[in-house]
Amino acid sequence: MRPSTFLPLGLAALTSGTPLSLARRSLFPPTSTAKGFVLVANVTDLSRDLTPSIQHFKLVGVHVGAGLETAVLTPDAGRVLYENGTDVEGYGIAADSSLSTAAAPAGFIYPYGMQIIPIPLGVEEDEDPGDADDADYVDHVGIDVGTAQRGVGIRDPPPASTPSTQAYGPDAGTFCVCFEAKPAYGRPQYPVRFARVQTVDGVAYQQIPDGCAPIRLLAQCAALEQVPAGAIYGHDFARTVRCYDNVAAVSWS
Ligand SMILES: *[C@@H]1O[C@H](CO)[C@@H](O)[C@H](O)[C@H]1NC(C)=O
Ligand SMILES: *[C@@H]1O[C@H](CO)[C@@H](O)[C@H](O)[C@H]1NC(C)=O
């Protein structure tokens, strides 16, 4: 995949002339609270959606190695996640073990956590030399065994900084979802990636590769699952977040 042209962030902000008061009202549909949630993709600019559309697809993890999952979007049920941590240690997005007691002995059932890291080269990139370009601009999003990466979570709704209850990554970047032309084990279809904000000569840029659609991952309330019997973790640090009852049913205007 060849990367698309640079999008200077400052310019995009300058050219959007929507009156703030109107924009605000439409972004604040009613929310509930829950400890569990699934993440639902919302394509903010429908002209950049993939074909067929991935609007309202949900985030799950696909096994790509021992204890390693790549975050992908699916039209089916989403993986139940929770925001985990403390104010002192910071928060991350965690998930229950995908192994049950049937598959792993007691003491070997670990929690999973979201990780946003450089794309593991040779694992998810195909042999097309142009494809390696993606790795310069977007990170891999994984759900892996162990502690969730701190500094990743669900933004509070107003009056806090952002107007919706959506996942945030390690910088002000944007989640996106990509079309995988040659899906295979380790290179699943619809991988979720994170487009970092890069500063070049003092100007902030963000690059969404061709074949990828920028998305927001909105939290939709879900019941936190039971911790599997024999697990070495619990839900003691699961935090209550604001979430939508049903993202697909929200009226945004
Ligand atoms: C969700 O997507 C719709 C359609 O593109 C858009 O109007 C709305 O503003 C989006 N909501 C959020 C919170 O991004
Ligand atoms: C959840 O948070 C607690 C407290 O910060 C931490 O000890 C634990 O490792 C975290 N679990 C995950 C899966 O991140």
Image (cartoon, grey):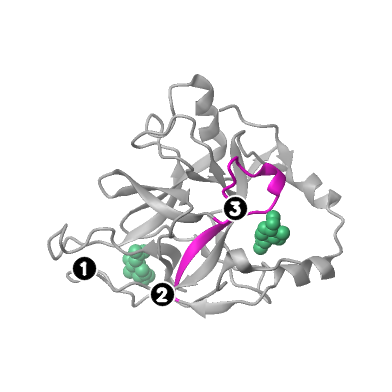
Expressed as whole percent of the image width and height from the top left, the position of residue 129 reads 49, 20
Residue tagged 1: 231
Does the stretch in magenta take in 217? no
Q: Earlier in the sequence, mark 2 or mark 3?
A: 3
Residue pictured at 43% horizontal, 63% vertical: 93
Q: Which mark is residue 223?
A: 2
| Distance Cα–Cα, label 1 vs label 2 | 19 Å
Residue pictured at 45% horizontal, 61% vertical: 150
The foreground one among 198 and 212 is 212
Magenta stretch bounds: 35-56
Q: Secondary structure at mark 3?
A: loop
Q: Which mark is residue 55?
A: 3
The foreground one among 195 and 227 is 227
Q: Is residue 201 visible?
A: no
Residue pictured at 42% horizontal, 68% vertical: 82
Which three-letter amino acid code belongs to the residue tagged 2?
Ala
- Alpha-carbon neighbours of circle 2 within 10 Å: few (<14), some, or many (≥20)? few
Judge: label 3 CB < 8 Å from ligand 1. yes
Q: Secondary structure at mark 2?
A: loop
Expressed as whole percent of the image width and height from the top left, the position of residue 63 reads 32, 46
Ligand 1 is in which quadrant of the figure?
Answer: bottom right
Q: Which mark is residue 30?
A: none
Q: Is residue 24 above or below residue 200?
A: below
**Is residue 57 found left or right of 105 in the rendered image?**
right
Instruction: For the residues labelled 1 and 3, say whether their Cβ atoms are less than 8 Å apart.
Output: no
Q: Residue furthest left?
A: 105
Identify the image quadrant of the C terminus: bottom right
The foreground one among 179 and 24 is 179
Q: Please identify, in this view, whether the residue under mark 2 or under mark 3 is nearer the observer.
A: 3
Expressed as whole percent of the image width and height from the top left, the position of residue 49 reads 64, 44
Which three-letter amino acid code belongs to the residue tagged 3?
Gln
